[in-house]
Every structure is written in structure tokens, then in C-alpha cells.
């Protein structure tokens, strides 16, 4: 293969370039690329009309689900970030193993270095032996991931509005009074069939109030997730094939994740953060007081033991 010398620039030609000239004023003509400015996350508000079904399965009207949602080009990324943060923050991170320096025993050399015919060994705590330490084993760590409060709420509302737009959601009237006589799983399964739900497919029910009879009626159905606004999470929304809301739950979603819900929700969460911060400060103060009082008692005891019975005169 013949390589042309003109294709490879020589050292003299590169040094002779005006970019490397010490007295050249061509640096003023070099345009420096600026860092892209931060683009704010866009938010849109989608309105979906969801049919309302009675306990007997008849349609009694429609109810609007007016939730904020991210645009189509960023919706997947927002929901993915919210899901990853939710799953990571649930990890306890308590898995722990012992290294060879933490395993008990092994201070004595098992057998002499030579004249045994065996492989040399300096300790029984070696990772090569059963009962020894673990090499690069897990240690307790913090898996939590930070996510902005507004982005977390936007991911949740985006997933809900996407399910409503895909006709995977329906609204039923409050049916707690139907089970006042007692829990009945057979009756709950029959109601699901009247609503067009398959008991063998995953479904998520969102209720503002869950009675004990309703909870006992659907507890034995493994494909149902019965949630309240307090336990609403992104994983169960994405893992379910059908979302079932009550009328009061839809009103809660519109007030919490709707167009005019930012100021109210932020104020409540800010108050909660203030309460948590105050409780944390009080806890730190109490721990500091206990430590200082304990240190003072230790100091008094040391003085008493040093000076003997003459202490305090």
C-alpha cells in the first residue's frame, strides 16, 4: 500500500500554522463555543374525559381528568427519572459482608511455611478458605437519588394522563357502602367483570378512603393493587394494565396535579419541610445537651477520684 506524504501533515507545517505563531493576532478570529443554556422543562395540560360507571356497570356520565404532563419529546425521560428515583430511594442498603480483616480468628499461622508439602498459608481468614473473608463484598451504602419535587410530581401526573389518553383508565362511583354487610370477594370479582375488567389482569384502584370490608374483599385477588393518595406511586401506575379511580379520587388528582395545583401543593410541602427541619434541629440540640451533660458528669467523677474526699471543699 502506497501512502502519499502529502496526506500526513509535517511538524514544520503544523508549527508554521498561524494558530501556533507567538506574535500572531489570529486568536481574536477564533470563535469559542458557548455552553448551551439550560432549557426549562416544558409542561402542558391535557384534558381527558373518562367514563363514569356505576356499581352495576352502567355508564352514568363522564368526568374530566385535567392533569399536567410533559410533552411527548421529554415525557419518557421525565417518567424514567421519577421511576429510577422512586426505586432507588426504597433500597435499604443494609447488605454487609466481612472482609478478611473483620473475620474472627486467624491470628496464628496454621502450619509452618516449609517442609509440609502444602501450599503456604499465613492465616485462616484468607478469602480462599471457607469461613474466610469476602473479597469486594457489599457494604452498607446509601442508594438514594435526589429528584426535584416538581419533576417528581410531573412524572406521576404524566403517567396518569398517558394512561387516561390511552383509554386504560375508568372511573367508578364510590362503592364502599356496597360492602357494609361484610367482605365478599365473589361480589367484588363480579363487579370487576361488570366494569369490563379481567380479574386475571393487573389493575390499580385509587380510592380516597378504603374501608376494612373493601380491603378484605379484594385482598385475596393477587392482580389488584388498592392504593390511596398517600400510597400512590409511579411503579404501580406503570405496572398496571388498567387504572380505576373513584369520583373523589379524580377530584383529588385534579386538585393536586392539575393546572392550578402548584401553589397549593408547594405550600403544603413547604410547611411539611419546615416541620421536619424544626424537629431535626430539636433532635440535634437534645443530643448535644445529652452529650454535654454526660461529659460534665464524667469530668466531675474524674475530679472526685483525683482529689478524693476533699472534693467540693
Image (tube, helix red, strand yellow):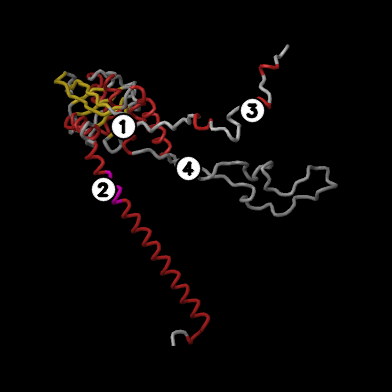
Q: Position of residue 178 (x, y in %)?
A: 17, 29
How far apart, in angstroms, are the residues tagged by discs 2 and 3? 66 Å
Looking at the rendering, the stretch of residues picked out in magenta corresponds to 269-275
Q: Which of the image's four quarters has the N terminus?
A: top right
SS type, badge 2? helix
Image-based side of 211 in relation to 105, left or right: left
**Which residue matches tag 4?**
93
Specify the quadrant of the image occupied by residue 34.
top left
Q: Residues within 10 Å of mark 4 (few under 14, many from 20)?
A: some
The number of numbered badges drawn on the structure is: 4
**Which residue matches tag 2?**
271
Q: Position of residue 265 (x, y in %)?
A: 24, 39
**Which residue matches tag 1?**
154
**Which residue matches tag 3?**
16
Q: Residues within 10 Å of mark 3 (few under 14, many from 20)?
A: few
SS type, badge 4? loop
Residue at screen point 67% across, 20% down: 8
Image-based side of 77 in relation to 188, left or right: right
How far apart, in angstroms, are the residues tagged by discs 4 and 2? 29 Å
**Residue 62 versus residue 297 in the image, above or below:** above
Q: Name the front one of labels 3 and 4.
A: 3
Magenta-colored stretch includes residue 106: no
Q: Contact (CB < 8 A) between labels 2 and 3?
A: no
SS type, badge 1? helix
Amino acid at each position: 500500500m502506497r501512502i502519499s506524504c502529502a496526506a500526513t501533515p509535517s511538524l514544520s507545517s503544523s508549527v508554521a500554522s498561524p494558530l501556533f505563531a507567538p506574535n500572531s493576532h489570529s486568536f481574536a478570529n477564533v470563535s469559542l463555543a458557548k455552553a448551551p443554556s439550560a432549557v426549562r422543562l416544558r409542561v402542558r395540560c391535557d384534558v381527558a374525559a373518562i367514563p363514569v360507571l356505576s356499581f352495576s356497570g352502567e355508564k352514568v356520565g363522564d368526568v374530566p381528568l385535567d392533569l399536567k404532563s410533559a410533552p411527548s419529546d421529554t415525557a419518557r425521560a421525565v417518567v424514567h427519572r421519577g421511576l429510577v428515583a422512586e426505586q432507588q430511594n426504597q433500597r435499604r442498603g443494609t447488605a454487609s459482608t466481612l472482609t478478611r480483616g473483620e473475620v474472627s480468628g486467624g491470628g496464628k499461622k496454621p502450619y509452618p511455611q516449609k517442609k509440609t508439602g502444602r501450599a503456604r498459608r499465613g492465616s485462616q481468614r484468607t478469602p480462599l478458605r471457607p469461613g474466610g473473608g469476602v473479597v469486594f463484598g457489599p457494604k452498607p451504602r446509601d442508594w438514594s437519588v435526589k429528584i426535584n419535587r416538581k419533576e417528581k410530581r410531573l412524572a406521576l401526573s404524566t403517567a396518569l394522563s398517558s394512561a387516561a389518553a390511552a383509554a386504560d383508565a375508568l372511573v367508578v362511583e364510590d362503592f364502599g357502602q356496597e360492602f357494609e354487610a361484610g367482605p365478599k370477594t365473589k361480589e367484588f370479582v363480579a363487579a370487576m367483570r361488570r366494569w369490563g375488567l379481567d380479574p386475571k389482569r393487573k389493575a390499580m384502584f385509587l380510592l380516597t378512603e378504603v374501608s376494612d370490608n373493601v380491603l378484605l374483599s379484594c385482598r385475596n385477588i393477587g392482580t389488584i393493587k388498592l392504593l390511596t393518595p398517600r400510597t400512590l406511586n409511579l411503579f404501580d401506575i406503570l405496572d398496571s394494565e388498567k387504572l380505576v379511580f373513584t369520583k373523589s379520587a379524580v377530584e383529588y388528582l385534579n386538585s393536586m396535579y392539575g393546572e392550578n395545583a402548584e401553589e397549593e401543593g408547594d405550600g403544603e410541602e413547604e410547611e411539611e419541610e419546615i416541620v421536619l427541619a424544626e424537629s431535626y434541629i430539636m433532635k440535634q440540640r437534645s443530643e448535644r445537651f445529652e452529650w454535654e451533660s454526660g461529659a460534665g458528669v464524667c469530668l466531675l467523677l474524674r475530679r472526685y477520684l483525683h482529689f478524693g474526699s476533699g472534693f467540693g471543699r
